[in-house]
Structures are given as C-alpha cells and as structure tokens.
Amino acid sequence: MSEFEHFVVLGSGRLGVFIIQELVALKKQGKIKSVVVFTRSNDSHERILQLGAKPVNVNYSNADQLVHALKGVDCVVSTLASNAVEFEKEVARACKVLEVKLFVHSEWGLPNVDHPGSRKGEVKKYLKEIKQPWAYFYTGVFIDLVFTPFAGFNWNEGKVSIGGSGNGQVSCTARTDIARYVAYVLINLPVEELENKAFRIEGERTTFNALFSAWESRTGRKLQITRTPREELEKRASHDFHSRLYLAIEDGDGVVGRPEETNLYWPEWTPKTVLQVVLD
C-alpha cells in the first residue's frame, strides 16, 4: 500500500479527468483506498461517479467546510484553472491545519508561460510561507489539446498555423501520459522524495518544423503552413496566451528544463510522441 492512501482531486476538467481515472484504477487494484473530487455544484456529479470517484460539493471560501472535507486525506492534487489562485490558497491553508502530507498545486505546463491573469507564483510563495509540503509538475504543452484544429493544426486538411519561425524547441506531453506519470510517482516515491519538489516531464522535445517534416514524410502529403511573424505576436502577447506561448518558444522558454532534469523516477514510462498522437 502507498504512503498516500486517500486522495482529493480539485477539478475534473481538461486534465483532472485523466488524473481521476488513473487514481481510480489504482484504487481498484487495491493500491490506494479513496478518490474524492471536490466540485462547486452538482452538475458534474454524475460524470465523476461514472469515473468511479466520489464527488463532494465544497465552498472554497468556507474554511471550516474545507477542513471538514479534507479530514483523513493524505494528498491533494489540484487541476484548477490558472485564475483559481485564491481557491488553491484556501485549500492549502486547510491542508496545513490538518497536516495533509502533500499538496500538488496547479502548475501544469511550462515554467515561464502563464495564462492571462494567472498569479500561480502566489500559490508557490504561500505554500512556502505556511510550510505546507508541496509538489508540482511541469509537463510542457498538452499534445492532445494544442495540436488540434482549435489551435490551428488541421491535419486532415493539411493546413497548420503557427507563430514565429518554428525552430524553437518545445516540450510536449499527452494528458493520458501526464496522468500516468503523476499517479505513479505519488504512490511509489517515499514522501521525503516528493516534498517540495518540481517534477519535469515531457513526452517529446521537438520543434514545429521537425514535426511538420516528420508528418509529411510519414503521410506523403505536403503541409500548407501559415506563420505569424514575431512582430504580430508581440502586439498580441498582453492579451493572447497563444501569442505569448509562441514567443516563449522562440526565446528558448518552451521546454520544461534541461534534458538531464526530465523524466526521472520512472524509467519504464513510455510516453507518446507528438506524431503518434497526431496520427492516432
């Protein structure tokens, strides 16, 4: 049995749903005892129950309610949106009161790229101030969200749109692989190896141009590539996350860390490459 037996997940959306699935799978295997999902309404209850977890309504502004809901919990994993800073701080405060062993705050993505309005640095600072043990995961961009028509990658039509030259390196990981890695390290590493640590993972480190060349070689088709120049990206950066992301990649901030810092602690982890996901 893991040192962490009782889990709470904050949020069941884009990433949370995959982490919930992995934790529930571990519960079915007898490796952990419970998976609870905090939600602010009844709207997601049926979906959470179908996943095999227990939904619990919480008011993140109600300190007493949070403390009650977190009793007996060993580890909290937050997948809340980037603008939910105050909610995370309230949960962190309750975790400290109850001596919850670990709080994984919502830091998914790249170290130097935040969504507009994000104040995640406040959560890091607060966790250190109150001495609540923490961990977070840098994962790079989510392959199965970024490389889609919504973000300008229409593979079926052979048309893609990017910002910048396409030569900057970027760390990329599929959400299913992120969830597998997170669940694995949380139940297999000793608590002392999890506390106050940043984990850096990537399914692949590549460039857009390398991906395009690989896609063309594999499919035998030619891509129509539209490139937004840097000057235009800079104009949009203050209000557009994608422009800021492309600028970060161009400037060398598109990776989760040095290669020797990434994908540690689970040698058998075999994440998918970008091309594998795109062609799947």
Image (tube, grey):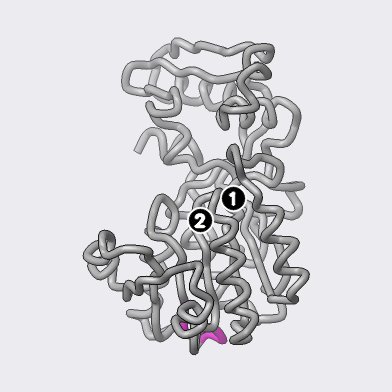
Mark 1, secondary structure of its residue: loop
- Mark 2 touches mark 1? (CB < 8 Å): yes
Q: Label 1, on which residue?
A: 139
Residue at image position (29%, 66%) is 48
Image x and y of residue 245, in percent: 62, 31
Residue segment shown in magenta: 2-7
Residue 156 placement, left or right of 153: left
Q: In the image shown, does 183 or 61 lie closer to the viewer? A: 61
Residue at image position (63%, 41%) is 114
Magenta: predominant secondary structure element?
loop
Image x and y of residue 109, in percent: 59, 47
Residue 192 placement, left or right of 166: right
Counting labels gives 2
Q: Is residue 46 magenta?
A: no
Image x and y of residue 194, in percent: 67, 73
Q: Is residue 5 magenta?
A: yes
Q: In the image shown, does 5 or 157 lie closer to the viewer? A: 5
Q: Which of disc 1 and disc 2 is earlier in sequence?
A: 1
Relative to 31, does residue 270 appear above or below in the rendering? above
Residue 249 placement, left or right of 260: left
Mark 2, secondary structure of its residue: helix
Q: Label 2, on which residue?
A: 178
Q: Amino acid at mark 2?
A: Ile
Q: Quadrant of residue 127?
A: bottom right
